[in-house]
Each structure stands twice: as structure tokens, then as C-alpha cells.
Amino acid sequence: MKKTAWLLAVLFMFATQQAFAAEQSLKIGVVDLIKALNESDAGKKAKADLEILIKTKQIAIDEKGKEIEKLKGDLEKQSSVLSAEARKGKEDDLEKIIREYQRVITDSQNDVKKREGEFTGEILKALRVIIDKIGQEGSYTLIIENAEGIILYSKVEQNLTDQVIKRYNESKAKDTKTTETKETKGKDKK
């Protein structure tokens, strides 16, 4: 019985030591890609560009809507004095404009989605490269994304989002300086 208790104590100490060693070698980081996308300088610029695009599209949609309302009003006012044939022609014109209006809305929505995908795709690709570098440099075992509250708790020091944003902004600033320097040198040679 004493041998069994002694053996269990030794096994318990060994298991505790192994668990402690495993805990120290396991390093996990967390990144909120949505926050990184929205708070990076390029993300803010992309968001502003999208808002301008949306406003421009909305102006065109609103103009078509006003044109439709005007034609509806004209048709109602003139319906009593128009012949059946003329009324039919005006109704056909109105239907044609309504179809065009719906097409403009659909095209606008598709264009905005496409542009948003282009903007975010490029930024997310660059963010993933930076996350990979941070993971390698920091000897992380795993870096996971905190998407929509999937991670209920993590230590603040495990959250790498601000570090990713900072490194991304720095890399873009460096890329911009390099491009400007090359352009300046090219102009000087001419």
C-alpha cells in the first residue's frame, strides 16, 4: 500500500511538472481582424473612399427616384385628358424608367460590394503577413482570430491587435516613403 501511495505521489509530481512545462511552451495570441481592418490607416481610408462612392451612387439613385415621382405625378394629372393610346405610352415609359431605376440600384450595390472586397482583400492579405511575422518573431504556437465574440476571455497581453495595426501602418508608411523616393529620383534624372 505504501509503494502504491509513493508511486502515485511520484506520478502526480511528474504529471504536474509536465503540465507546467507544456504550459510554458504553449504561447497563444489573439487578433481581432475586424478591428485591425477598421482602425488601420489604410482601412480608414478605404472606409472613407467607400462612403464617397456610396454617396455618389445614392445621388444618382435619388435623381432617378425624383424623375419617377415626377412622371407618376404628370401621368396622374394628365390621365383624364390623355387618350388611351397616349396613356399607355406614358405608362410604358414609366415602367421602363422604373426598370432602369432598379437596375441602377442593383448595379450600385454590386459595385460597392466589389470595391469593398477589393479594398479589404488587399488589407487583410497584408495583415495576415504581418501576423505571421509577429507569430514567428514572438515564438507563438498559435495565433487565433477573435471573430464576433468567439473568444470569451483572453489575457490582455495575448491580444496582438494593436501591435498588428501599428506594424501594418508602419509598413505602409515605409512603402509610401520608398515609392515617393523612387518617384523623386526618377524625376531628378529627367
Image (spheres, rainbow, N blue to C red):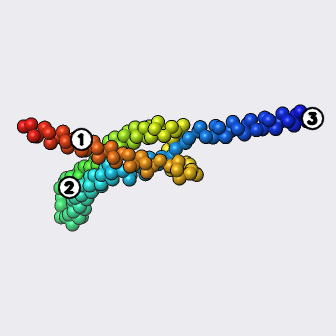
User: Is there a contact, CB below 8 Å, between mark 2 and mark 1?
Assistant: no
Residue 35's disc is none
User: Is there a contact, CB below 8 Å, between mark 3 and mark 1?
Assistant: no
Q: Is residue 18 above or below residue 160?
A: above
Q: Residues within 10 Å of mark 2 (few under 14, many from 20)?
A: some
Residue 90's disc is 2
Residue 1's disc is 3
Residue 34 in view of the camera: no
The quarter of the image holding the N terminus is: top right
* Residue pictured at 30% horizontal, 54% vertical: 48
Q: Hey, what amino acid is under mark 1?
A: Thr
Label located before the other in sequence (2 or 3)? 3
Q: Quadrant of residue 75?
A: bottom left
Label located before the other in sequence (3 or 1)? 3
Residue 177 at x, y percent in the picture: 24, 44
Q: Residue furthest right?
A: 1
Q: Is residue 189 above or below residue 110?
A: above
Q: Hey, what amino acid is under mark 2?
A: Lys
Q: Nearer the viewer, residue 126 or 185?
A: 185
The span from disc 2 to disc 3 (Cα, nearest Å) is: 102 Å
Is 110 on the left or on the right of 149, as rendered? left
Q: Residues within 10 Å of mark 3 (few under 14, many from 20)?
A: few
The span from disc 2 to disc 1 (Cα, nearest Å) is: 60 Å
* Residue pictured at 87% horizontal, 37% vertical: 5
Q: Nearer the viewer, residue 98 or 93?
A: 98
Indicate the secondary structure of the residue bearing disc 1. helix
Q: Quadrant of residue 120?
A: top left
Q: Nearer the viewer, residue 174 or 67?
A: 174
Is 27 on the left or on the right of 126, as rendered? right
Residue 165 at x, y percent in the picture: 39, 49
Q: Nearer the viewer, residue 108 or 118?
A: 118
Residue 13 at x, y percent in the picture: 76, 38
